[in-house]
Image: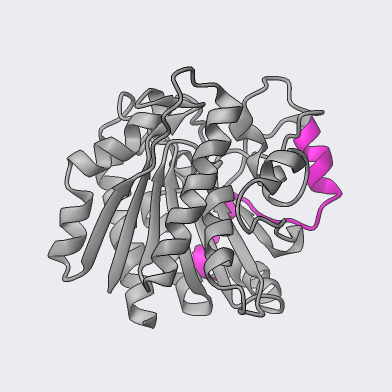
Amino acid sequence: MRIHTILVPYDSGHRAARMGRGPLHFSKHGATDRLRAGGHEVIESVVDVTTTFPTEIGTSFELYRDLADRVGGAVTDRAFPLVLAGNCGSSLGTVSGVRAATPNDPSDIGVIWLDAHADFNTPETTATGFLDGMVLAALTGRGWHTLTASIPAFRPVSDAHVVLVGARDIDAGEEQLLATSRVMRVEAARMEAGGAQATLDAALTELARHVSRVYLHIDLDVHEPSEAQANQYAVPGGLAASTVRELVRVVGERFSIVAAALTAYDPSYDDRMLDTGLQIMDAIVDTVAARS
């Protein structure tokens, strides 16, 4: 299997700071070599910007545009795009890149989004101004219209094609927007009690009525922080690492995973997350390879 691991080592427009260190940490500790050892052909590249004065919004969208080109190139080259990013906004570039490379594919793309947070604020509802807390809303066409339109092949994903898993730290404004959306939500506690296969069945069955291919997005703070803490935003009540790996298998049995991302790992918090993330990469690649 051909794999293109694409590193986006930025957090809020700043390179190799905070969660922007995560992709480089995975690379330094052999993520690509590990995949090659599994018999795969792997290319690794890094998305960078050249601005001398980084700004959170402008620099971030420059990264997303470049990432869309990289992902599109990977898909055209018949390589699986595995994105390691500091921020969840990489999803805007990843989904757009897949679409750019498959313009004649009549099927839409579904999104399986694992996160401790909903990332469903808009510029009108956010109290923090943190761009990454708005990106799932932007991906579904809520806000940032001029800048999302600057990403090659961007178009909103229908919120009816989104399954949000594990979100538990949600602002009041996000709750209101989610309540009026068609996003399907699956709680972490319910999945831990019932297992990924049974708990996801209804949402995946509904999703399969609309799409056959999905983008798998794993913000690593979806995990229970007492097991492995991804970053400063981690909150209790998350998923076990074994449950996340089970979810990867369950999703891969029902959909073609056309791209995947691991995001939001700050290595200064918990070294256990390094092995957790590497095992998730293995699970994703094994699952995709089994369908190839």
Residue at 78 percent of width and 30 percent of height? 172
Q: Is residue 148 above or below residue 11?
A: below
Residue at 29 percent of width and 70 percent of height? 2
Q: Quadrant of residue 152?
A: bottom right
For the residue pair 132 and 247, the one nearer the viewer reads as: 132
For the residue pair 196 and 72, the one nearer the viewer reads as: 72
Q: Residue furthest right?
A: 180
**Does residue 270 show up magenta in the picture?**
no
**Does residue 183 show up magenta in the picture?**
yes
Q: Position of residue 253 (x, y in %)?
A: 47, 78
For the residue pair 98 and 197, the one nearer the viewer reads as: 98
Q: Position of residue 132 (x, y in %)?
A: 59, 34
Direction from residue 61 to residue 218 in the image, left or right: left
Q: Residue furthest top?
A: 53
Q: Is residue 173 above or below residue 78?
A: above
Is residue 192 at all visible to an observer of this figure?
A: no
Q: Quadrant of the N terminus?
A: bottom left
Per the rendered image, the range of residues in magenta is 173-197
Residue at 55 percent of width and 73 percent of height? 102
Q: Quadrant of residue 205?
A: bottom right
For the residue pair 106 and 53, the one nearer the viewer reads as: 53
Q: Is residue 16 above or below residue 76?
A: above
The secondary structure that dominates the magenta segment is helix
Is residue 244 at all visible to an observer of this figure?
A: yes
Direction from residue 32 to residue 175 in the image, left or right: right
